Image (cartoon, helix red, strand yellow):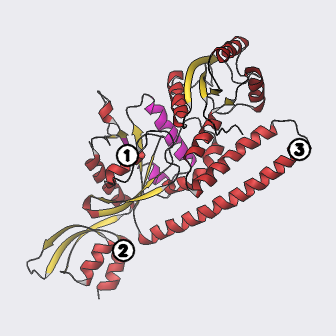
Amino acid sequence: MRVSDMPHQVYIIQPYIKWGKKKNRLTTPQLQLDEGIALINTLPEWKVVGTRIISSISFDKKTFFNTGQLESVKDTIKNEIISALFINTKLLKIGQLILLEKLLGVPIFDRYSIIINIFKAHAHTKEAKLQVALAEIPYIFSRIYGVHENESIISRLKLLKEYKRKLGKAVEDVRRKRDLLRSRRKELQFPIVAIVGYTNAGKTSLIKCLTEDNNLIPEDKLFATLDVTAHSVKLPNNINAILMDTIGFINDIPTDLLEPFVATLEDALLADVIVHVKDISHPDHVAQETEVLETLKKLNLPDDVYNNIITIGNKCDKVKHIERNDNIHLISCKNNEGVEDLKTMIADAIIKAKDMMKIRIRVANGGAEYQWLLKESAVSDITVDKDPQYLLLNVYITKAKFNKFKHKFVK
């Protein structure tokens, strides 16, 4: 496994297919290169010392590059202070990797191995570390299976399979614990709002704005969040909800790398409302949105949730001219523009998703009914009745809870 504990002086090559079915038409080589640079800059003490964009008609060549390109790269490495080469493609074949390292004399990284390095650097909890270790296994398998089998290789494969089994069991234990937490939330009937989006789009910043929690410290780096975290928020009409921060999505990521994090993304699958955060200032935001939505589809998100995703365009303060669109709500977490309106949108979406009723009810001031409704429903407005011993409440409540209320108090 090409994972490094030491920092590197990295030369980045951004390959792209010039034409044909495999040409990526959603983005540009320069934007892909920019993301590659951001990936390297996310790793502590790693430094980008040079970049190049190289065209190709196929990524299947034995040396990945054609002869002229390979010689040019070799000369660059020879004449510059370069300790590693990052080829910003999803996954190199084992034969390509071995041959390139032999010919170029430096460690070679592909997109999979760089993202694994980032995950390792950012995994702090036991759960995150387990998920990263499990995400690493398919990569190691692909490297070993590509080598000519002998007794030593067969022995390593057996050990690796046993290690994978133990890791899988540990991750399943984590999933069971997370399922218990979800069940508890379901019993309490808390509305769940999942915050999803491309990595570094501003998900944590949005949660900080919505909750006004100054202890949250958003970081300007890719994959800053590997753990799902829950945050309580009070929305308009006095609706209490839980916001779930999730791992960021990224383009061109192998499914094997995403699979161990499905346990965290399941919080999005089981949410009542999903808020999709887009960095509207990013030149590649259209391709990023496509990646997020396609990944959510792969996770079999229920149609009723998928079709009612609230899409927001964050960082609108960075863009001079924005085309207004009814399907996207513009906000700025930096100056709070649009945040209050977004709170109302989320509250309305929760009312719809939870099939909540709005009722007006007269209760004794300070009585048991009043106390129960304060605890179990969203009391949006309170006025004193003509008889000051009573209050008139505007209440948002689910049908199930209203039935409980009637069973408890209406004789």
Out of 11 and 164, give the one closest to the viewer.
11
Residue 162 at x, y percent in the picture? 78, 55
Looking at the rendered image, the disc whose residue lies closer to the viewer, 1 or 2, is 1
Q: Which mark is residue 349?
A: none
Give neighbour class at mark 1: few <14, some 14-19, many 20+ (Cα, 10 Å).
some
Residue that mark 3 sits on: 152
In the depicted structure, whether residue 243 falls above or below residue 137: below
> Residue flagged by tag 1: what amino acid is it?
Ser
Residue 251 at x, y percent in the picture? 55, 35
Give neighbour class at mark 2: few <14, some 14-19, many 20+ (Cα, 10 Å).
some
Q: Residue 94 lies in what quarter of the image?
A: top right
Q: Residue at x 39, y 48 (%)?
A: 217
The answer, for residue 309, to whether it is visible in the render is no
Q: If you read the primary sequence from the N terminus, does the residue marked by circle 1 or circle 3 appear first? A: 3
Q: Are marks 1 and 3 in contact (CB under 8 Å)?
A: no
Q: If you read the primary sequence from the N terminus, does the residue marked by circle 1 or circle 2 appear first? A: 1
> Residue flagged by tag 2: what amino acid is it?
Lys
Q: Residue at x 63, y 29 (%)?
A: 89
Q: Which residues are magenta?
A: 283-312
The answer, for residue 305, to whether it is visible in the render is yes
Q: Residue at x 67, y 50 (%)?
A: 134
Residue 234 at x, y percent in the picture? 30, 60
